[in-house]
Structure formats: structure tokens, C-alpha cells
Amino acid sequence: MTRERWEAHYSGRARAYWTEQRTAALTGGKHLAILPGEAPALLRALGLLDKDGALPPDRARKFFQINHLVRLIEMPMTALHAVHETVKVIDAGCGRSYLTLLLAHCAKQRGQRIEILGVDRDPTLIEECRRRTALAELDDVVRFEARAVDQLEPGEVHAVVALHACDTATCDAIALGVAARASLIAVAPCCQAELARSWSELAGTTGGLAPVWKAPHLRREIAAHITDAMRMTLLRAAGYRVSAAEFAGEHTKKNTLLRAERGEVDHAARDEYDALVASTGGRGLRLAERLR
């Protein structure tokens, strides 16, 4: 079966499955950027829909998560399209390319020009991303490279995004965006362990956070939030307006989006970062030196 015949056959089956009642039950009245009955081939390429067009419960979490994330960066992306003829995006640590393909799909549906580069260390994963992209017919605007984000020479970039890039990979994405003077940096951190590792070395010492340092679970959980606060402060010092927002909180614990848009340098932010480091044990992030 040709790609065109497959899409027509599958889309017809999925649209028949997604009746008005089923769609309403899925969305619960929420406005979603991508609906199964409207973009079945894309969602099938992403591995979210079954052969009959159904969305299994275990995949619904990812479906809602990426929909919500797209909504949170929709406004700044629209602003970029208003300024640039072609918006250039890097998806740093693209993983299985969920966000990459959704951004490309949304732009094409609106008649907006976009070029997206997805980057990940795993060559096997990159090949899977390329397969998905061809299946979704988005390979005219999306390409992939198997390499480390911190080795990338970005060139002209308007936005850097990263969905659940693990540990310091999120810092790599931030550093890349700042170096490229990207107008938008949007990252959803995952498994922030750098600060927790440093705090573990303080477990036998005394200090205001000693009860946290010697409790592994609390150390990991609190270090993750302090890490994000440090990242936000460093981004402000680099000339960005930064916000932290929860996305799809009922579907995952890794649900914080840091959204940074280029603005004015906050000259007090470095002092705030240093004070935060000092008050939490004197251990900071390597990102601080990279952005100094």
C-alpha cells in the first residue's frame, strides 16, 4: 500500500471511530491543539493511536501532556511567525520526536513556514524519528541529527525547545538557546540530578538544610525545584523574561515548563543566584559558568 493510500484508509477509519461523543468524552470540554479525529495519521506515526484509531489509556497521558505543552508555547511561537518568514527551531534532546512533529504539524496547518532540527545522542532513536517524520509527511520541514546538544553549532535559531531532556541535558538546551540568542527557550526538565549529587556530599555535615541533605528522597525532590529556580535566575541574568508553569499535572510528575523570552538583562539576577547557592549549601550548577 502506498503512503497516500495508507493515510486515506487509516484516516477514514480513525475519523469514523472518533465520533462527536467519543471526542467530547476524551477532551472533557478542553480545547486541544491536536485531536485524534483531525490528525489521525500524525498521532499514529507518533505511536499514540492504535490500528483502529483508538487512544489506549496508557498513551492518553502522553497525548494530553504534549497537547498542553504545545498550548503553553503557542503564543510566543505565533509571535515568532509574525516576525520571521521562516521560524527556525531546535528540539534539543528530541527523544522520540513528539514535540518536534507536533510543532511542525501545527505550523503547516496554519500555513506558517517552519524549519525544525531535532537533536539526540542516540543514532537508533534518530532513525526512528526519521521514520515517524516520513510517515507523518513532515520531512520537508523537519530533519534530525545524532549528536550531543553541547557540540552543536546552532547558527540562526529563533526557538530552542526541550521536552524532558534528562538532568544536565536541559542545561545544555538552555546554554544553546542563550548562545544562539534565541527569542524563545522552552524546556520541560526531567530527572535533575546534578544538584542532588552535590548535596549528597553534604549529608554528614551540619547546616540549615541538613535534614534534606541526608534524606535521599527529599534531597532529590527539593533539589529539582531549586535547580529550576537557579535556571530561571540565570536566564534572567542572560536577558530573558522567565516563567514557570505546570502542564498536564494530572498525567505526569515531570510537569514543569520553564518558558524564557528574550528581554532585558536583569542585573540583580546574578546576585540572587549567588545568594540562592549560598543559602542551600554552596553548591550551584555548571550552567552558571557556561553563561557567565
Image (spheres, rainbow, N blue to C red):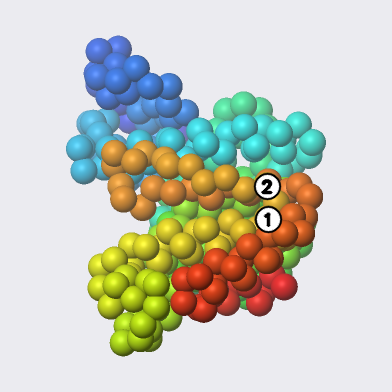
Q: Reading the chain from its start, which is encountered first: label 2 or label 1?
A: 1
- Distance in Å between CA atoms under marks 2 and 1: 6 Å
Front in this rendered view, residue 101 or 199 = 199
- Residue to which mark 2 is pinned: 241
In which quadrant of the rendered view does residue 3 lie?
top left
Residue found 65% across the figure and 37% down from its top: 76
Disc 1, SS: helix
Task: Say if mark 2 contacts mark 1, CB within 8 Å.
Answer: yes
Residue 114, percent from left and from top: 67, 42
- Residue to which mark 1 is pinned: 236
Residue type (three-letter) at the residue carrying disc 1: Arg
Residue found 76% across the figure and 47% down from its top: 263
Residue type (three-letter) at the residue carrying disc 2: Arg
Front in this rendered view, residue 11 or 147 = 147
Query: Going by the image, does 269 lie left or right of 186?
Result: right
Q: Does any portion of residue 74 appear in the rendered image?
A: yes
